[in-house]
Amino acid sequence: MPVPVIVLNFGHSVLRSLEDYTEAASEIYRHYRQGRNVVAVTSAQGDQTDVLMAEARRIGPEGIAQNLPELIQLGERKSAALLALALERTGASAFVRQARDIGLQARGPHTQAELVDLNVAQLQEDLKNHDIVVMPGFVGIGKNDRPSLLGDGGADYTALYVAQRLNAPALLLKDVDGVYESDPKDADDSPGRYQTISWTEARQRTDVLISPKALNFAEDKGVEFFIGRPGIPFYTRVGAVMGAPSTSPVPRKLRVAMMGCGVVGGGVYRRIMANPDRFDLVSILVRNPQKYINQGYPADRVTTDYDACVAARPDIFIDVSGPVEPALTYIRDMLDRGVHIVSANKQAIAEGGRDLLKRAGDRDVMLAFSSAAGGGMPILEMCRREKGRIVRIEALLNGTTNYMIDEICNGKTYAEALEAAQEKGFAEADPSNDVSGRDAAAKIRLLARLAFDIDVGFDRIPCDTIENFNPPEANKCVIKRVSVCHDHAHGFDASVELRNLCPDDFLAGARGEEARATVYFTDGDAYRIRGKGAGRWPTTEAVMADLYDISERVAFRTCNLKASPVL
Ligand code: HSE
């Protein structure tokens, strides 16, 4: 099945600090989980280009040196590597490609070159294999196979060129959420923001925001594109049509409470605290407050008391606890109070069944649980999106098992492998659900509900345990424990089964805690998806993406602003 692609450009104004790369990786993940492959084009970090230019002036000849691009391109290249590392932490299968790798050819003066070619087939192949490709902007391969710079705004221009060649939409990410009548940072009043603006008008208003070279290219080739800010759900569309400016929305800061603060909760806590403009963490419900206070968590917000958590009036309740109870009771109660839910607790969500969806519907609030199955692999989004087309899902859904089987096959004992999985934070507090298959079975229940609208009990999901698993000797196959659900003419089957897979099977290629799934459609087509199935940062990423989805609806749509179309 062809996967839609989006080209994102991260401008230097949104890559000022190392933390900004974490936010940029989240932006990419949010597009990826909507079912798109992503080409991410990087600018240099903050003022890196100026720093490099100053160094070149100090050591090099006067005027424009032949070797200048060798130095200046390092800013964008470093940025691409940092972004790929931030993505790798989330479990994304990101891959850096340099201009040379994808045949991005430039012609003309070596500091003001024009892009003239791209090896589209190579880039498409890379996207097929890795889903996300990160590439430095601002540089192409010029005369004599040497790098050539593309001039001011060269990263925007790179993104628009690649988008045009791939026939994909482009979103240029800046530190403002679109094009305004005048720069909102300098203005005393509140200038209007354009939802759509023509290339011509944009050229007159935004020579700093978008370079004339990028705009000229877009107009010349008829490329419409979007300008926006990471994490903000609306954009300015720049193209043939001119619109009128309108009042810019002021989002409401959302009050967030969380329950549980273990491996995943600790990651979520850090990400929320790093976003004080968007979220106010009002309560942290844990069993042992002192442990967290000693670690520097805010003493006035850490509590064992659910009533105190309710009294903090959260807009959103995040459940990152493990057991069914008390999570399920609290989720029901919060839904009835009109509080949005983000839950990573697959056992509670599976057990709560349709009743939870009904309660959420009754109060018109969101019940989001992307992180409850697949960790950072957005399998539940895929099920929701493709519902009605899916006939069968085969997936590696338990990171602990995947990791343990690999480790045992590499020579560890069962006990050593389990201990390592616990140390890495993959296993549940009580790992018996992981090894018995019940954890994967709970995830199948969630998949079945979203993909097939079927409620399936644990008693209908036979599970192969991996307890005391020993690898067979001289086995050419790859052993994995595969979670299966299949809707067919004679009914519905689900299982968690140890299988010998051919080495070239997509699932067999998973390493360590990696999650993978092959989803089969009614028309015979199949779709492959992957991510890290367990661990702090991949799971945190899925929780944060849910949080941003809710924020989009609660903080922004209450401003009566329609999200921009297309993206
Ligand atoms: N214990 C779970 C696993 C955590 O290993 O997959 C992620 O759901």
Image: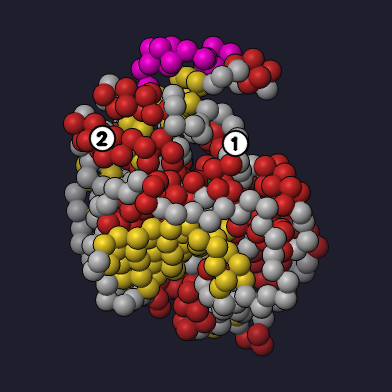
Q: Quadrant of the N terminus?
A: bottom left
Judge whether residue 311 is colored magenta: yes
Q: Residues within 10 Å of mark 1 (few under 14, many from 20)?
A: few
How did the renderer colour the structure?
secondary structure
- Mark 2 or mark 1: whose residue is earlier in sequence: 2
Residue drawn at x 56%, y 29% is 261
For the record, the magenta segment spans: 298-316
- Res 206 visible: no
Side (left or right) of 118 relative to 513: left
- Please tell me in which quadrant of the rendered image residue 249 appears: top left
Label 2 to label 1: alpha-carbon separation? 27 Å
Q: Amino acid at mark 1?
A: Asp
Q: Amino acid at mark 2?
A: Asp
Query: Closer to the observer: label 2 or label 1?
Result: 1
Percent position (x, y) of residue 374?
Answer: 48, 52
In this view of the protein, which residue sits in the foreground, 557 or 312? 312
Q: From this view, report whether residue 479 is shown above or below residue 234.
A: below
What mark, if any, has residue 355 been given in the picture?
Answer: 2
Please give the residue where the numbered disc 1 appears in the rendered image.
430
Q: Secondary structure at mark 2?
A: helix
Q: Quadrant of the C terminus?
A: bottom left
Ligand 1 under 8 Å from disc 2 Cβ: no
